[in-house]
Image (cartoon, rainbow, N blue to C red):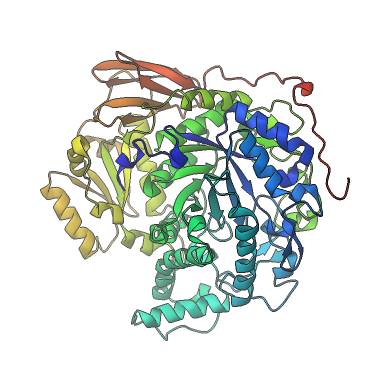
Amino acid sequence: MSGGRLINTFPYGFTRPIVYGEYPYYRAAPDRWGPNLAALAQAGVDVVTCYVPWRFHEIAPRRYDFTGARDGQRDLPRLLDLAAAEGLRVMLKPGPFIHAEVQLGGLPDRVSPGVDGRYAAVLDAWGKPVMSQGLPLPSLFDARYRAEVGHWLAAVQELVLRRALAPHGPVVAVQLGNEGIYSDGNRPAAAHDFAAPAVEAFEARLAAAGSPLAGTMPAGPAADWPAGLKAAWAEHSGAVLRDQYLALAAGLVPEVRRVATVNLPLPALAGPPESGASWLLRTGRLAETGLAEGYTAWVGNAARSRTAFGAHWFGVRARRSDNVEENWGFTWTDPAFGQPANALFHALLALALGSRSCSVYTACATEHWGPLVDLDPEGVRADGADPQDFAPPYCPGAPLREDGGAGANLAALHALRDLVRTAPGRLGGHFLADAALVVPESVALAEAWPDGERPAEAAVPAAVRTALELMERHQFQIEVLTEAATAEAVPDGSLRSRRTQMPWLVVFGPDGPGALLADRLGAHRRSGGAVVPLLAGGAMPADALARLLPAPRYAHPATDPAVVLVHADAAGEPAAVFAFNLAAEHHTVRRTVRGRQVCVELPPRGAACLWWTGDAFAVAAGTAGLEPLPPPPVSAFPSRPHATKETA
């Protein structure tokens, strides 16, 4: 997919980047819904996103309350009407597994194999059940569980979605699954589902493909499989996730299918060394579903961790996806997530990497939920967490509060609102690059499930670290190309030659590239592009690489280290500049763009967006001086009582 798709192709008819804001209605008092949604619209949210917990709406097996007949907090039509009245659009996310810090990820307890032994449990590679708050999760390969999932999604479709879809209603998107099936899209291959029906499906796929591995499955846990079977499983994982998403979408009517989307996690480069390679294979076939794709960013603080920053850059550019979930106030692991400068840093990073959206998760801190939603304390402890972290309020640093007060990150949301709403024609341009990092599938296959002792540093995180050094210390702007992307033609006017002729930094394994990639590398050389090999498992010195590459086009001799990403307009001219200081001290960042010096002062862990004004680049938004806003009086958001059948 070429970077040109970002020119005037924003979602839902917008002509600028959009702002998603998560609103967990099942954690908020119904009389606060209206005032909260009005405040979100005023603060800058365009599209409200809401998980829809299966366990919360199910009142008996296969019986649901979506109208508030039993509890006004379940009245989804009223919620949607209130959103529409404020001019908000809505993305509903019915899972089935939603995580969202809801007990059993939103699944009803009755489908857990720990409650009903007729369901097959998800097993890890050692044959142990995969647990969520003390209960085993059901395998989506289990036909009985798939039937229950199908009934739930059909009910959401018939009782909620069909009457609420745009243009007659506010619903513009429906998200299926959650970061894979069980938030497992960036887990290592050994952490996928090895339930008996899952392994049987794998064996059937090998046989159908005529693989010499067919019929060689040994008895015992998958952790003891030979290396060839492990590599085949890792390769198979992409087809599995594709097919599981297609299974979730199978019962959707065409008008709902057209707005269906999936969210994928970014690669967990701070996790086990093989996680990056496994992520490449796991997500590599999602385009075959035809579903729209977004990303979630729960991989660390990119303003304070270069590994997390690299995971954002590598994941977003590899998938060319849009931000649909970003931490705007959960401070469990890092109190900086409750600071507006940190929130705006991540929003600017999403835009700089080509996202057409920014997500505020959550946009409103809420305090009212019951036992159906609340996490079981013993289960939380069994998962190695502290139940107090999940006590009210949900998302303490959110921009707004359920009671009408201002939250810690409201100043960041206002800054983001003001940026995107003055952005038509300025944001959403081509991601320019001086070179591209290419990670072949053969390298991902070799390290996705290591056989024996893990390497100290696997090829994917090592290559990302080297690319980040080239960007931060040597002023390069680096693109990411998956092996599939190397085959794409780039019919993109003035940018064609830049894309086809830029140097490719190619990670080579011990066996070199496969035949298909070797042909593409030859074609790239013949078009005038250089191929610079990076050896998997070997040293990748950025200083030496910088000397092998043409000078970066926007370099300035007197700049402090920073990552600077430049976007071009439809004519190929630089239109926006994003600058990120990853250091703990103040930096003065300079580049030479359009023949002029661009200079911006960045505080520690700071960021800024500048755009072309006709004769210079001016700062449009930045983290410098961004402080929490004083709270408005609570009386500015009067309570609106809502009567239900139970209270009338």
Judge by depth and name the residue closer to the eye, 171 or 21.
171
Residue extending furthest top?
A: 615
The x, y position of residue 38, in whole percent, is: 66, 30
Q: Which residue is drawn at 81% across and 40% down?
A: 642
Query: In this figure, what is the number of numbered marks?
Result: 0
Q: Residue at x 70, y 25 (%)?
A: 406
Taking the image as shown, residue 643 lies to the left or right of residue 364, namely right
Judge by depth and name the residue closer to the eye, 135 or 356.
356
Residue extending furthest front?
A: 168
Residue 81, picture quadrant: top right
Vertical placement of 407 versus 558: above or below? below
The x, y position of residue 482, in whole percent, is: 32, 53
The x, y position of residue 127, in whole percent, is: 60, 74
Residue extending furthest left?
A: 526
Q: Which residue is drawn at 12% across and 43% down?
A: 528
Residue 425, picture quadrant: top left
Residue extending furthest right?
A: 647
Vertical placement of 343 versus 272: above or below? above
* Residue 330 visible, this orientation: no
* Residue 223 visible, this orientation: yes
Taking the image as shown, residue 455 lies to the left or right of residue 643, namely left
The x, y position of residue 532, in whole percent, is: 22, 46
Picture quarter with the C terminus: top right
